[in-house]
C-alpha cells in the first residue's frame, strides 16, 4: 500500500530537518579551539529571510562567545560544520539531505570581538568562497562533506592586526526556486589576528543588505534542465593584494 501523500510530505520534511547543520568548531595550525570562540546559534535551523538581522551571525549571534581565538595573519584558519551540536563524527555528512549550495567566509573588523553586540551593523569583506563547478557538478557543500565538515581559508596577510568576527556561511539551495526558499546557515567566530599589516581594510558589505531575495544566487532552480552555471551571491573575494 502506498503511503498517503501527507505522510510522504512529512517524511521528506523530516529528512530535510535532519540535514540541518551548524558551523561549530574552529582550529588554526595544531590548535583546536573547539567551540570556545563561536557565537553558537541556538539550534541547527536555517535563516530564510535575507532582510532579517539574524542573517549577520544567526539566531543568538549577538551573544558573545566565551573566548577569542588567536591566529596569525597569513595563516590558515579552519571552520567546521556538523549537523548536530558537538558531533564531530565523520561518518555523518556535515550537511546532507540534498542541501547543495555555496560556502563563503567573511571577516569584519571590530574593537572588541567579545563584546560587540550588533554584528548586523558591521562591514563584512569576503575572504573565501566555493560555489558550483559545472565540469564536476560539485558544490561547496560537497567539499564540506568530503572533508568532515572542515573549510580552511587563509587569513589575509596585509589586514590590520586586531580583533575580528569571522562569518562562515553555507547556503542550501534545494528549495530555492521560489523567493524565501534558500536556507542560510552561518556562525560567527571571535578571532584576534596578529598582524604587522597597517594598510586599509578592504571594502565591505552589510548583513542584512548584501543579499537580495531575488538575486540569481539566492533564487535559483538547481534541479531544472536549464541549470548549468551558478552565480555566488554577495561581493567578490577581496583583491589578492591583501593576501
Image (cartoon, rainbow, N blue to C red):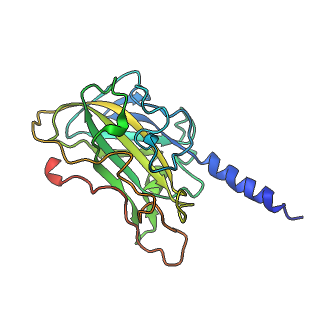
Q: Nearer the viewer, residue 31 or 102?
A: 102
Q: Position of residue 78 (x, y in %)?
A: 36, 40
- Residue at 56 percent across and 36 percent down: it is 43
Marker count (numbered): 0
Give left or right: position of 154 versus 224.
left
- Decide: is 185 above or below 137: above
Q: Position of residue 93 (x, y in %)?
A: 55, 48
Residue that lies at the very extreme toward the right in this rendered image: 1
Quadrant placement of the N terminus: bottom right
Residue that lies at the very extreme toward the top in this rendered image: 66
- Residue at 30 percent across and 46 percent down: it is 153
Give left or right: position of 44 versus 31.
right
- Residue at 30 percent across and 31 percent down: it is 191
Q: Position of residue 168 (x, y in %)?
A: 39, 43
The quarter of the displayed image where residue 111 is located: top left
Q: Nearer the viewer, residue 117 or 102?
A: 117
Q: Position of residue 187 (x, y in %)?
A: 43, 39
Amino acid at each position: 500500500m502506498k503511503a498517503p501523500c501527507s505522510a510522504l510530505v512529512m517524511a521528506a520534511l523530516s529528512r530535510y530537518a535532519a540535514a540541518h547543520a551548524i558551523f561549530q568548531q574552529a582550529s588554526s595550525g595544531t590548535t583546536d579551539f573547539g567551540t570556545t570562540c563561536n557565537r553558537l546559534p541556538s539550534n541547527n535551523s536555517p535563516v530564510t529571510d535575507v532582510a532579517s538581522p539574524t542573517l549577520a551571525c544567526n539566531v543568538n549571534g549577538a551573544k558573545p562567545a566565551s573566548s577569542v581565538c588567536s591566529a596569525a595573519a597569513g595563516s590558515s584558519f579552519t571552520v567546521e560544520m556538523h549537523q548536530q551540536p558537538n558531533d564531530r563524527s565523520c561518518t555523518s555528512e556535515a550537511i546532507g539531505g540534498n542541501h547543495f549550495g555555496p560556502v563563503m567566509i567573511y571577516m569584519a573588523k571590530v574593537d572588541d570581538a567579545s563584546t560587540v553586540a550588533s554584528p548586523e551593523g558591521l562591514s563584512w569583506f569576503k575572504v573565501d568562497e566555493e560555489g558550483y563547478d559545472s565540469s564536476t557538478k560539485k558544490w561547496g557543500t560537497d567539499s564540506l562533506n568530503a572533508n568532515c565538515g572542515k573549510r580552511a581559508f587563509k587569513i589575509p596577510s596585509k589586514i590590520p592586526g586586531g580583533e575580528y568576527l569571522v562569518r562562515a556561511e553555507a547556503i542550501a539551495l534545494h528549495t530555492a526556486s521560489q523567493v524565501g526558499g534558500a536556507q542560510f546557515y552561518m556562525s560567527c567566530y571571535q578571532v584576534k589576528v596578529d598582524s604587522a599589516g597597517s594598510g586599509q581594510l578592504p571594502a565591505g558589505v552589510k548583513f542584512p543588505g548584501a543579499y537580495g531575495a531575488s538575486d540569481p544566487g539566492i533564487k535559483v532552480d538547481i534541479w531544472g534542465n536549464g541549470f548549468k552555471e551558478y552565480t555566488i551571491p554577495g561581493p567578490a573575494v577581496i583583491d589578492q593584494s591583501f593576501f
